[in-house]
């Protein structure tokens, strides 16, 4: 529980109201307004809740001014350099880095849960072949509650644990199945002898007719993409998971709600939008035209993949992602691709042009992740599903934390009503 050290005074209509101020371990102090409505009969107005703390959390901290992202206190740069995705999963779920024995046990549990119920194969076949993979994932993940009845009781700590393991283990399988289904290829079963990222790539790109060996460079890049997207504080999809969970909904339904929210282009579709923008520009010689459009306040065009609504300086994930992008492109020998040339030139301009530098419009994680995923062979429709399977551990960690919070209440935002006042019904013949 955050400490109460000071109070803030709110004055209106000749009355003063003392509001407690809570001090976090890092970040700005918070004014506690939980009793404001009961004591003062007023609400606060905060569209988007951008100035409102909806919960206490010990999981992730972002300092947008410093360009800092911490998972349980560990800088993302250190984790990306020294750790791997499943270790980060353990960290987010449990609050500390695992011992060697704990890590071995955790990896074993995840590996043994990667297969999905065989009847789920028939569920996939109910979708049209041209369904977007995110549409398929929303339906399938929500339907997991119809297949795994033994992990639906949110009041049972063991069932919560099993549900968490299942979703972290099965989301890559479900995402890969959604991809295979969309391109008309047979489903590929998971392999217990492969690591988490390699297993996902194998399920996406192998076929029964021939052997497929996962490149360690591509597996490392995929592992980093997953790690960098594992959690990001109280964003829209995480808040959706928490809001759904506050009603007592089962964890599979809550994560399905998070996936649906992530599907929105303003949230999870940024790397796809960035790649589509690069393709729209087309060739390097057209870049000046689009730079001019981006600088024109009256032009609706926006450069995607630059700057971030939270990071006011630089995105700490972008540097790590750039390293992976260079490694992947070198491995695959992709240097003559026109889209890549446009990306490289835009990157150079953004790091040198005074307009971009002064506004701190640096390339962000979405700029590089889209390039990597396309180079690996993923269609743009798979970018957001990969984001979803990466973020699942963050959603589950936040959900578990919320369920264990003694201050938990069902979410119920208020409104500033500006509609009609009470009026009498008029029969249709008199209107």
Image: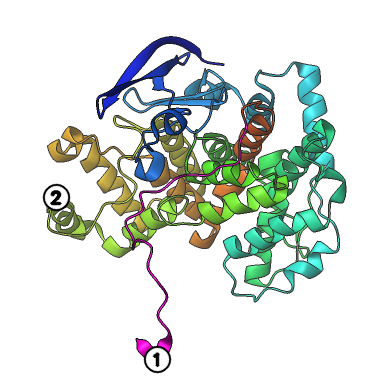
Asked if marks 1 and 2 touch (Cβ < 8 Å), the reply is no
Residue neighbourhood size for the residue with mark 2, other residues' Cα within 10 Å, grouped as few (<14), some (14–19), many (≥20): some
State the residue at coordinates (19%, 36%): 359
Q: Is residue 306 magenta?
A: no
Identify which residue, 162 or 179, lies in the foreground. Answer: 162
Camera-near label (1 vs 2) is 1
- Between 116 and 286, the one lying in front of the other is 116
**Residue 34 at x, y percent in the picture:** 48, 29
Tell me the residue that label 1 is attached to: 429
Q: Which of the 4 image quadrants contains residue 18?
A: top left
Disc number placed over residue 124 in the picture, else none: none
* 32 horizontally vs 256: left or right: left
Residue 227 falls left or right of residue 24? right
* Residue 336 seen in render: no
User: In the image, residue 408 lies at what x, y percent?
Assistant: 62, 32
- Asked if 23 appears above or below 274 in the picture, the reply is above
Question: What residue appears at the point 70 percent right and 69 percent down from the top-left corner?
Answer: 185
The C terminus is located in which quarter?
Answer: bottom left
Classify residue 269 as left or right of residue 360: right
Magenta part mainly helix, strand or loop? loop
> Cα distance, mark 1 to mark 2?
57 Å
Q: Which residue is mark 2?
A: 295
What residue is at 77 percent from the left and 65 percent from the top?
209
Secondary structure at badge 1 equals helix
- Snapshot quadrant of residue 92: top right
* Residue 309 in picture, x, y percent from top left: 33, 40
Residue range highlighted in magenta? 408-431
């Amino acid at each position: 529980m955050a400490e109460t050290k000071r109070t803030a005074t709110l004055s209106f209509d000749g009355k003063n109201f003392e509001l407690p101020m809570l001090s976090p371990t890092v970040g700005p102090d918070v004014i506690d307004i939980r009793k404001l409505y009961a004591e003062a009969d007023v609400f606060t107005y905060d569209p988007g809740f951008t100035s409102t703390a909806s919960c206490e959390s010990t999981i992730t901290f972002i300092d947008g001014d410093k360009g800092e992202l911490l998972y349980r206190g560990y800088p993302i740069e250190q984790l990306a350099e020294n750790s791997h995705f499943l270790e980060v999963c353990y960290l987010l779920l449990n609050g500390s880095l695992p011992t060697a024995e704990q890590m071995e046990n955790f990896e074993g549990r995840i590996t043994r849960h990667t297969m999905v119920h065989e009847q789920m194969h028939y569920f996939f076949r109910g979708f049209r072949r041209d369904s977007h993979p995110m549409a398929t994932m929303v339906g399938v993940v929500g339907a997991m509650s119809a297949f795994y009845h033994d992990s639906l009781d949110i009041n049972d700590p063991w069932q919560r644990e099993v549900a968490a393991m299942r979703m972290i283990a099965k989301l890559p399988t479900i995402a890969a199945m959604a991809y295979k289904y969309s391109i008309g290829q047979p489903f590929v079963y998971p392999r217990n002898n492969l690591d988490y990222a390699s297993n996902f790539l194998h399920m996406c790109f192998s076929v029964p007719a021939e052997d497929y060996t996962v490149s360690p460079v591509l597996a490392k890049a995929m592992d980093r993409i997953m790690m960098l997207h594992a959690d990001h504080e109280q964003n829209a999809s995480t808040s959706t998971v928490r809001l759904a969970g506050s009603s007592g909904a089962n964890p599979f339904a809550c994560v399905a709600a998070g996936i649906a929210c992530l599907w929105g282009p303003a949230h999870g579709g940024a790397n796809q939008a960035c790649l589509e923008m690069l393709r729209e520009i087309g060739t390097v010689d057209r870049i000046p035209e689009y730079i001019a459009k981006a600088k024109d306040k009256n032009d609706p065009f926006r450069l995607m993949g630059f700057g971030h609504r939270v990071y006011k300086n630089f995105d700490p994930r972008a540097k790590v992602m750039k390293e992976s992008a260079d490694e992947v492109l070198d491995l695959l020998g992709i240097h003559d691709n026109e889209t890549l040339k446009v990306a490289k030139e835009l990157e150079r301009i953004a790091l040198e042009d005074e307009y971009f530098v002064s506004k701190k419009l640096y390339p962000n994680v979405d700029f590089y992740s889209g390039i990597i995923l396309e180079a690996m062979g993923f269609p743009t429709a798979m970018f957001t599903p990969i984001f979803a399977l990466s973020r699942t551990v963050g959603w589950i960690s936040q959900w578990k934390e919320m369920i264990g919070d003694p201050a938990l209440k069902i979410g119920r935002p208020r409104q500033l009503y500006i509609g009609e006042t009470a009026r009498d019904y008029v029969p249709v013949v008199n209107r």
